[in-house]
Image (cartoon, rainbow, N blue to C red):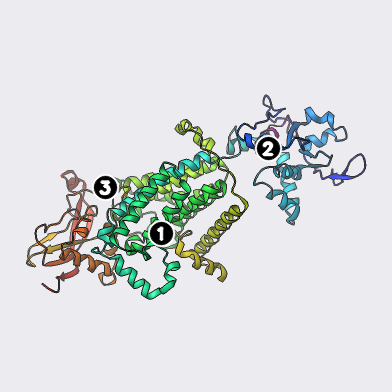
Amino acid sequence: MINGKWSLAENGSRIGFVGTHARPDSNVPRSPGRCQIMQETQEHPSEAAGQAQGPRPVLIYDGDCGFCGYWARYWQKLTHDQVEYRTYQQAGADYPTIPTSDFQRAVQYITPDGHRASAAEASFLTLSHARNNRIWLRLYRSLPGFAPISETAYRFIAAHRSACYRVSLLLWGKQHEPPRYDLTAAFFLRLLGLIYLSAFVSFGVQAQGLIGSHGILPLTDWVDAVAGELGTQRFWLVPMVFWWNSSDLAILAVCWAGAVFSLLLAFNVVPRISLLVLYGLYLSLFYAGQVFMTFQWDTFLLETGFTALLMSFARVPGVWLLRWLLFRFMFMSGVVKLSSGDPNWWNLSALTYHFVTQPLPTPLAWYAAQLPSGVLKFAVGCMLFIELCLPFLIFCPRRLRFCAAIGMLLLETCILLTGNYNWFNLQTMLLCLILFDDAALRNTALRRLPSPREIRPPRTLNAVAINALGILIVICSLVQMDQRFGGDPPAVAQAVNRVIEPLHIANAYGLFAVMTTERDEIIVQGSYDGIDWRDYEFRYKPGDVTRPPSWNIPHQPRLDWQMWFAALDDPQHLPWFSHFLQRLLENEPSVLALLKTNPFPNKQPLYVRAQFYEYRFADSQEHAKGQFWQRRLLGLYFPVSHLSNN
């Protein structure tokens, strides 16, 4: 249709719809070689070789328009040799029935049998020849309102081609090409193997003291209790391999098998099998670890690992699911801070307390706490901006995604330098890698890495299963986000979320909703006579005021972390704490191995107790003399206890 009329072929049949568009701007940049796009099929020779010989549709565009040439080159890389691309300056003489003004107003798509379409319709017809891009033509033809909106948008762009060309260069770069993620995915999976390795080894060296038969919370006792309560439902509600064997040997076998498969993944050996096994083994440890495995980074790792498994079958859906995971994790971390109503986040004073009150500070935390209050408030503002605003750039053009990745990497680096959060920050930084494509990585030191083998698209049945799982993850995560915002999702959606919740393939996130303003520490002591008390020193949590914090990344000292949470709670609500004191009275080697020192190496103590102290960073003068902490006794946290047979 030109100016509202159908364009007719010489035989009078209706052959296409042509929109009305403005002439290209006279100052559109020109570039050498714009009048002809060379066929670029080297990257996908198999697709090029598989095309049947014969007439092809032709897309004709304005060779004098920089914007047209830019996107025609991009589309040519998408469609390979399924569409022929020609400029109207070159091909116009072959189509004498089409006025030159039509070529100048909009792109023209001409089929081998002579049918013609233009503007937005021509664009969508062209894209329909590219894998995973047929949806746009279906929407154009089937969704009410989509076609006129598309044509209106096309007319606007056509009227501002010069500006749109500059915007395209800004957002996508000069050498824009269809994104590929083979190198990105391969590098991501190898590094994920190292993250898994850290998690399995970290828990493995603590497992006997935490959940072994002589540990704080023996797994065998817990398995018997849950089996008696849930019956056969336990296999779905608490999925783990320990239902068949919960011995100490089985615990170690799961931990070290996980370490082996982590290395296999890191070296790209049977990656899909490794990812599946790693997910199953870590899910088993997640439940077996009981109170010691209740942290967000454990569910974060489970969801990342499962989504990575999907990505190993289907690159693009997997990449976008991982981006969705990163968005939820970052955005909800910011949302919960403000939605909690904690004034320390709203008045930007949170970092005034954070460095001293966080569970396990690093040696650099003391120096960060000495920064002026204005600097700390500015840092809080930057952090909230990164968590609340930058995540939306994840769904934007590539260069805006790069900006989001850089901002998030900067935030995670600052957190990593001042706080010990095991592999948590490293895993978040790893997810930022997914915001880059292969072309971006090729511009870094990774350009020397060999190109990974491109995976074939999944077969129909596999594709249906992967897409179904992806949709399920998105739906359940939206349900959880809605509930975090105080919403009431549809009952069906909530039911679906409850059904798959035990698998932890979609989880709720949100860290440090309320800022702790004081640091209270539990100091556990033992005695032979009830008069002379000796302190049990932990490996990482504060104790001796002269002992500075240490680095433990990527290790997760789970008892030390639980002691931080215990200081915020009533010991009567923490059954594990009394079990821990009992093991100290027994001088249990596996539990004592979790500590830095045992003040009773030759004979078990007769009494234990727990004192409550307030801890603060030492001032500058004390710090210069080698003191790291100040502490003040608050009272008794847990009363004097002894074994009943003593």
- Determine the CA span between mark 3 and mark 1: 36 Å
Q: Is residue 526 left or right of residue 228?
A: left
Mark 3 or mark 1: whose residue is earlier in sequence:
1
| Secondary structure at numbered mark 2 | loop
> How far is disc 3 from disc 2 in space, using C-alphas?
64 Å
Q: For the magenta stretch, what is the residue range?
A: 61-69
Task: Name the foreground residue: 380 vs 588.
Answer: 588
Q: Which residue is mark 1?
A: 283
Q: Which quadrant: the C terminus? A: bottom left
Number of marks present in the image shown: 3
- Identify residue type, mark 1: Leu
**Which numbered dot is residue 366?**
3
Mark 3 crowd level (few <14, some 14–19, many ≥20, 10 Å Cα) = many
Snapshot quadrant of residue 174: top right
Viewer-nearest of discs 1 and 2:
2
Amino acid bearing label 3: Trp
Task: Decide whether residue 561 is among the magenta residues.
Answer: no
Q: Look at the image and tell me whether residue 166 can be seen.
A: no
Which residue is found at the position 70% from the left and 35% from the top?
81
Q: Is residue 96 left or right of residue 23?
A: right
